[in-house]
Image (cartoon, rainbow, N blue to C red):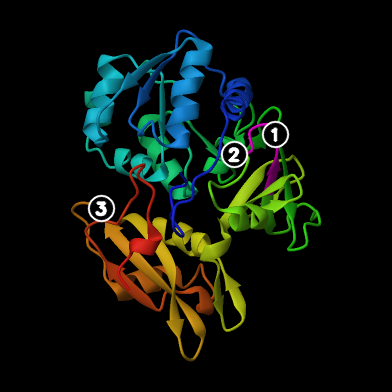
């Protein structure tokens, strides 16, 4: 089932052939071998862990260490005790790992790299983590309906922070407009995917299945662009796009700027109905332990970096953001 971050979960009909093709394609990009020890905190019922952790480990003869639940300290302890070489997680996990007071208390010499997926990884979170651990994060992406891996920054190859990398083997990706026409590089449109990893349809939901495809191309619902080197960047979820006074506002752009503030641990921006402007951005913020921040202070910080219509009109500070079982921020569960 899909994670349902923007609506009700839907059952994606994925065959054994879909999963095998996806694991084989991902194996070429992720470069895992029999000597690797993968520390797994993601639930195996979700496509990310099911394919990228479990099936890939079986296919490559790697070791998989299951950690019952995610805590930053528990994960670091597992990496140290089991001599883990790879950790796969969602952005919120890397944000929390970046707040551990003293990572040098753990023997992490065996840890080669981290892989991030499930949601867009804020560049600021990546930079904070890598500055503390000196371990690279390779960001990738893909929806449940695609097995789920569609693209990743290639391990050992060229890495472009802020992008989700290149399509894996046997997967084709394009940026298209509302009619399915391919758009040129650096033009925002919807990401569509084709390949042996793509689902057969939604369980008992023929209407949703029909709406999800342009012919054989699956419509991911992600807005993004591709550069001249073929690296894809996710701008935002199509359903999350805000229209403020007729102008497009991508919540991820606002979130990226909020994350730059040193007091911010997590952030989520959603649209709030407004009689005058149609919609206005509303931000939900979780602060780092021991830090303080007011709404006025945050707005002063943001003004040089965002156009006026992109600034949050309402800012709410919370002790935690609602999340799915995989740790993805669940925007539809934020307080109204």
Do tag 1 and tag 2 residues touch (Cβ < 8 Å)? Answer: yes
* Residue 243 vertical placement versus 120 (above, below): below
The residue located at (49%, 80%) in the rendering is: 279
| Residue 29 - label | none
The x, y position of residue 294, in whole percent, is 26, 71
Do tag 3 and tag 1 residues touch (Cβ < 8 Å)? Answer: no
Other-residue count near label 2 (Cα within 10 Å), few / some / many at <14 / 14–19 / ≥20: many
Q: Earlier in the sequence, mark 3 or mark 1?
A: 1
The x, y position of residue 169, in whole percent, is 69, 27
Name the secondary structure under disc 3: loop
Query: For residue 107, what is the image quadrant?
Result: top left
The furthest residue to the left: 290
Residue highlighted by disc 2: 146
In-image side of 231 versus 3 (left or right)? right
Which residues are the magenta region?
192-199
Do tag 3 and tag 2 residues touch (Cβ < 8 Å)? Answer: no
Q: Nearer the viewer, residue 271 or 126?
A: 271
The x, y position of residue 4, in whole percent, is 44, 53
The residue located at (61%, 30%) in the rendering is: 18
Alpha-carbon distance for marks 1 and 2?
A: 9 Å
Q: Nearer the viewer, residue 141 or 115?
A: 141
Q: Is residue 244 visible in the rendered structure shown here?
A: yes
Q: Nearer the viewer, residue 181 or 276?
A: 181
Other-residue count near label 1 (Cα within 10 Å), few / some / many at <14 / 14–19 / ≥20: many
* Residue 132 vertical placement versus 258 (above, below): above
Residue highlighted by disc 1: 171
Name the secondary structure under disc 1: loop
Q: Main secondary structure of the magenta part?
A: loop
Q: Earlier in the sequence, mark 3 or mark 2?
A: 2
Residue highlighted by disc 3: 288
């Amino acid at each position: 089932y899909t994670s349902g971050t923007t609506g009700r979960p839907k059952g994606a009909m994925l065959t054994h052939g879909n999963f095998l093709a996806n694991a084989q394609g991902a194996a070429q990009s992720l470069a895992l071998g029999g000597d690797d020890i993968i520390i797994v905190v993601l639930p195996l019922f979700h496509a990310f862990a099911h394919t990228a952790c479990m099936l890939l480990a079986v296919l490559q003869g790697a070791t998989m260490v299951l950690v019952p639940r995610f805590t930053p300290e528990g994960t670091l302890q597992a990496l140290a005790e089991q001599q883990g070489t790879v950790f796969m997680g969602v952005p919120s996990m890397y944000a929390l790992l970046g707040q551990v007071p003293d990572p040098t208390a753990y023997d992490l010499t065996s840890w080669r790299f981290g892989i991030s997926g499930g949601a867009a990884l804020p560049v600021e979170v990546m930079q904070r983590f890598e500055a503390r651990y000196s371990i690279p994060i390779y960001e990738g992406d893909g929806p449940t309906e695609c097995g789920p891996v569609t693209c990743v920054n290639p391990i050992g190859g060229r890495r472009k922070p802020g992008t989700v990398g290149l399509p894996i083997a046997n997967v084709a990706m394009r940026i298209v407009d509302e009619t399915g026409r391919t758009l040129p590089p650096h033009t925002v449109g919807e990401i569509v995917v084709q390949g042996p990893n793509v689902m057969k349809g939604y369980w008992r939901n023929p209407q949703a299945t029909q709406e999800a495809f342009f012919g054989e191309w699956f419509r991911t619902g992600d807005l993004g662009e591709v550069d001249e080197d073929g690296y894809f960047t996710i701008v935002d979820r199509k359903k999350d796009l805000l229209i403020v006074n007729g102008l497009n506002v991508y919540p991820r752009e606002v979130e990226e700027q909020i994350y730059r503030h040193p007091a911010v641990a997590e952030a989520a921006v959603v649209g709030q109905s407004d009689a005058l402007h149609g919609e206005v951005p509303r931000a939900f913020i979780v602060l780092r332990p021991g830090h303080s921040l007011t709404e006025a202070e945050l707005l002063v910080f943001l003004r040089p970096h965002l156009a006026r219509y992109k600034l949050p009109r309402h800012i709410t500070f919370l002790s935690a953001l609602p999340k799915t079982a995989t740790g993805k921020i669940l925007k539809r569960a934020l307080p109204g």
